[in-house]
Amino acid sequence: MRQYRTTAGSGEKLTRQREAVLQVIREREDHPTANDIFEAARRRLPGISYATVYNSLRFLKEAGLVHEIKFGDGASRYDRETDRHDHALCTQCGKLVDFDLPQAAALISAAARRSKFKAESVHLTLKGVCPDCRETRNL
Amino acid sequence: MRQYRTTAGSGEKLTRQREAVLQVIREREDHPTANDIFEAARRRLPGISYATVYNSLRFLKEAGLVHEIKFGDGASRYDRETDRHDHALCTQCGKLVDFDLPQAAALISAAARRSKFKAESVHLTLKGVCPDCRETRNL
DNA sequence: GTTTGAATTTAGAATTAGTCTAAATTCATT
DNA sequence: AATGAATTTAGACTAATTCTAAATTCAAAC
């Protein structure tokens, strides 16, 4: 009886396409959307398709190599930072920045107690005005 | 020179349609989507259109009468509770519950300091497994 | 009480973000 | 070289929401 590959265990096949997507995310310090990533990946690998970018993003996310951030507004953004951290979203220009609030991690058990949920993760987002927008004439 | 209405100041015109939408949200203790609200509103006001439900939701939100909750997944949910509070989202059944974590409100200044943003609001979400799903055979 | 026009509602088209499908390609293993 | 599982591709499809243009409502001015 012949033996075929039964793998599919994540982290295995970092294809050219997946690698290109990962590079794109790692080389930027902002938080690109799938579309931004598609455009940048296309420059590295001109034939890459939109669907592949989405497939790659799912793969990389499941492999723990990138982090997906979803707000209700518009498209998901992707983040090379995979450790737990918090986000601040500018209500004027949409800029998204990472920061870490050590206290936030500690809230997980309090939140679990209050909500009666079995906790998996806590997500804290600050909405406000970023330094750039504040400077630009609208205090 | 004739004087026409220059109002448009929010909170003014609670039309039949807007009132119906508000009633629907107030009478439920879960967090319906726009589509849920449309279906329920249709029972009260059979001619109401989808677009009007969306328009009404925007109006009510701006008037501070309802609260919109957006996660990246699927549709926005609407909440009759407009005071600051936190959310827990079940990763298995999608149930969304409100709870209040008094400590969360205090994080706003710490978060502002870290991120250098001018703070407007903090949003804390716990992801995990709700009591019902935990009970149902998957500890 | 009729006219007026701004605001609102309606129905359906349009848009956006993302997923699905089926055929073609890749590539490690036999 | 042959095989077939995994991946990629292009484009069709879906879901949520917004937009558009015509019809309706309604308070204010006459």
Image (tube, coloured by chain):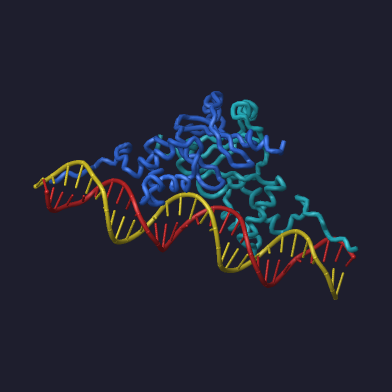
Chain colours: A cyan, B blue, C red, D yellow
Residue located at (58% from left, 58% from top): A39
Picture residue at 45% right of the left edge, 41% below the top: A92
Name which quarter of the figure residue C20 lies in. bottom right
Q: Does residue B35 show up? A: yes
Q: Is residue B75 left or right of residue D3?
A: left
Q: Which quadrant, please, contains the N terminus of chain A? A: bottom right
Please give left or right for residue B120 compared with residue C18 in the image.
Answer: left
Q: In this view, does B77 lie to the left or right of B1?
A: right
Image spot of residue B19 (x, y percent):
35, 40
Q: Which of A110 and A78 is in front in this view?
A: A110
- Splitting the image into 4 quarters, where does residue B65 fall? top left
**Is residue B115 visible to us here?**
no
Vertical placement of A71 versus B125: above or below? below
As rendered, which of B5 and B110 lies closer to the eye? B5
Residue A31 pos. (x, y %): 58, 46
Q: In this view, does B139 lie above or below A60?
A: above
**Image position, residue B49 (x, y; %):** 38, 52
Q: Determine the residue positioned at 58% across, 45% down.
A: A30
Total marks shown come to 0
Which quadrant holds the C terminus of chain A? Answer: top left
Point out residue A29 in the picture as x, y percentages from the top left corner.
61, 45
Q: In the image, is residue B67 above or below residue A52? A: above
